[in-house]
Image (cartoon, rainbow, N blue to C red):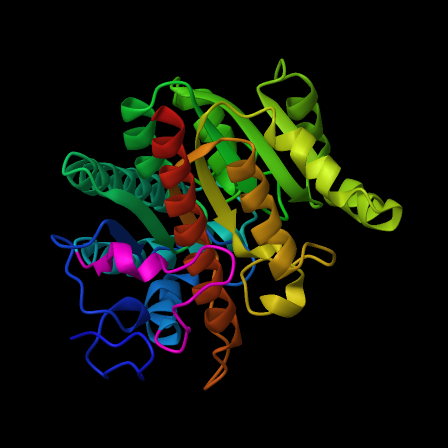
């Protein structure tokens, strides 16, 4: 008999649970990939670090109740990604060192091509695995890895829920095209989603504070498909005491079915100091939960989610994974609350 008040057993699964993918309602895909990380690698160790840190999370949540009761399991179907990452990272470092300027250098052009092909393979693996579990009526989440990893799961969700909206929390806009030559860069995920997945109707971004001029133009010229709440907007809302009103207005732009893509660097970097590209500013843990809660209060149904860019610290420093595990539990909790609300509304 599982005791949610007891310490987790050493051989237990995520959050100390004994669920299997077959019995769990929530199936998490661990994707240990960070080949295109351009500043500080290490997020490929995120899924494993979160797994270990999650066993210290108390399972009763004051906002969302008892998410663990639905059953949560982390699957190992994507362990093949790890070997792909090792090979691609060696090639990517050559390209990154050249700042993506590979034209005319046969060795660098070949390395870039191999990284792009490996990225496509990861996309395919994620898509196929996500679709398999979605077809079994599971709620599928993804734990990265860098922020390039959720493209495949977003493809699968957009097929099942056409007209899907994306609630995107991040320090970066991720609207670059082929950053440093990498077509599937972690800095390009929302641009790829915007251009290549027709089933995505709208992207609403929160906490954005690090972006280039080209990305700013892309936001403005999206025809309303991309709505951005900049970090300076949230900072001003705090000062004026209308934070809740600002996030409520933004989530109102989303369609009924939404997918949450959460880059941990959207938080204040004191909460994620080891992440690949930390940026000053950001939101607190409770503000992140408030954004998710505002979407649920507005009647949105969270159909799926990802958490990315959690990177373990040096040695025994598990702070980033500690925070990441708790963000993941909030994502699961608010997803389940939104599903229950949707069921109640239909009665």
The count of marks equals 0
Q: Residue at x 48, y 54 (%)?
A: 37
Q: Residue 171: tell me if it is visible.
A: yes
Which residue appears farthest toward the front when viewing the image? 347
Which residue appears farthest toward the right when viewing the image? 240
Q: Residue at x 69, y 45 (%)?
A: 210
Q: Which residues are magenta?
A: 55-76
* Residue 164: percent from left, percent from top: 42, 24
Pick whichever, 211 or 257, lies toward us.
Answer: 257
* Residue 321: percent from left, percent from top: 46, 70
Q: Is residue 119 above or below residue 56?
A: above
Say left or right for 188 vs 206. left
Magenta stretch containing residue 83, yes or no?
no
Quadrant where the N terminus lies? bottom left
Q: Residue at x 59, y 47 (%)?
A: 170
Which quadrant of the structure image shows residue 123?
Answer: top left
Quadrant where the C terminus lies? top left
Q: Residue 101: tell me if it is visible.
A: no
Say left or right for 27 vs 109. left
* Residue 242: percent from left, percent from top: 80, 42
* Residue 13: percent from left, percent from top: 23, 70
Q: Is residue 56 above or below residue 68?
A: below
Q: Residue at x 37, y 71 (%)?
A: 54
Magenta stretch containing residue 72, yes or no?
yes
Which quadrant of the structure image shows residue 175?
Answer: top right
Which residue appears farthest toward the left when viewing the image? 22
């Amino acid at each position: 008999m599982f005791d949610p008040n007891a310490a987790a057993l050493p051989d237990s699964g995520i959050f100390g649970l004994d669920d299997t993918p077959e019995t769990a309602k929530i199936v998490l895909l661990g994707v240990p990939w960070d080949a295109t990380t351009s500043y500080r690698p290490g997020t490929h160790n995120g899924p494993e670090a979160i797994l270990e840190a999650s066993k210290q999370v108390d399972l009763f949540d004051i906002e969302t109740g008892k998410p663990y009761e639905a059953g949560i399991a982390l699957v190992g179907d994507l362990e093949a990604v790890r070997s792909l990452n090792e090979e691609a990272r060696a090639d990517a470092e050559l390209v990154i060192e050249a700042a993506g300027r590979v034209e005319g250098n046969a060795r660098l052009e070949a390395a870039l091509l191999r990284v792009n092909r490996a990225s496509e393979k990861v996309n395919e693996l994620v898509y196929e695995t996500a679709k398999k579990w979605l077809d079994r009526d599971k709620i599928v989440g993804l734990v990265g890895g860098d922020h390039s990893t959720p493209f495949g799961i977003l493809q699968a969700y957009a097929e099942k829920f056409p007209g899907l909206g994306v609630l995107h929390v991040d320090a970066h806009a991720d609207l670059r095209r082929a950053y440093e030559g990498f077509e599937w860069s972690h800095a390009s995920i929302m641009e790829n989603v915007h251009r290549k997945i027709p089933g995505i109707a709208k992207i609403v971004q929160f906490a954005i504070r690090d972006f280039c001029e080209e990305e700013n133009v892309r936001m403005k010229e999206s025809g309303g498909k991309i709505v951005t709440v900049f970090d300076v907007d949230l900072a001003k809302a705090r000062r004026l005491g209308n934070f809740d009103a600002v996030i409520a207005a933004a989530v109102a732009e989303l369609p009924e079915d939404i997918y949450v893509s959460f880059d941990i660097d959207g938080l204040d970097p004191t909460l994620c100091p080891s992440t690949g590209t930390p940026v000053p500013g950001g939101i607190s843990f409770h503000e992140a939960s408030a954004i998710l809660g505002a979407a649920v209060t507005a009647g949105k149904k969270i159909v799926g989610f990802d958490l990315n860019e959690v990177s373990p610290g040096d040695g025994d420093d598990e702070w980033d994974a500690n925070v990441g595990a708790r963000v993941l539990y909030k994502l699961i909790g608010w997803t389940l609350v939104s599903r229950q609300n949707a069921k109640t509304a239909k009665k």
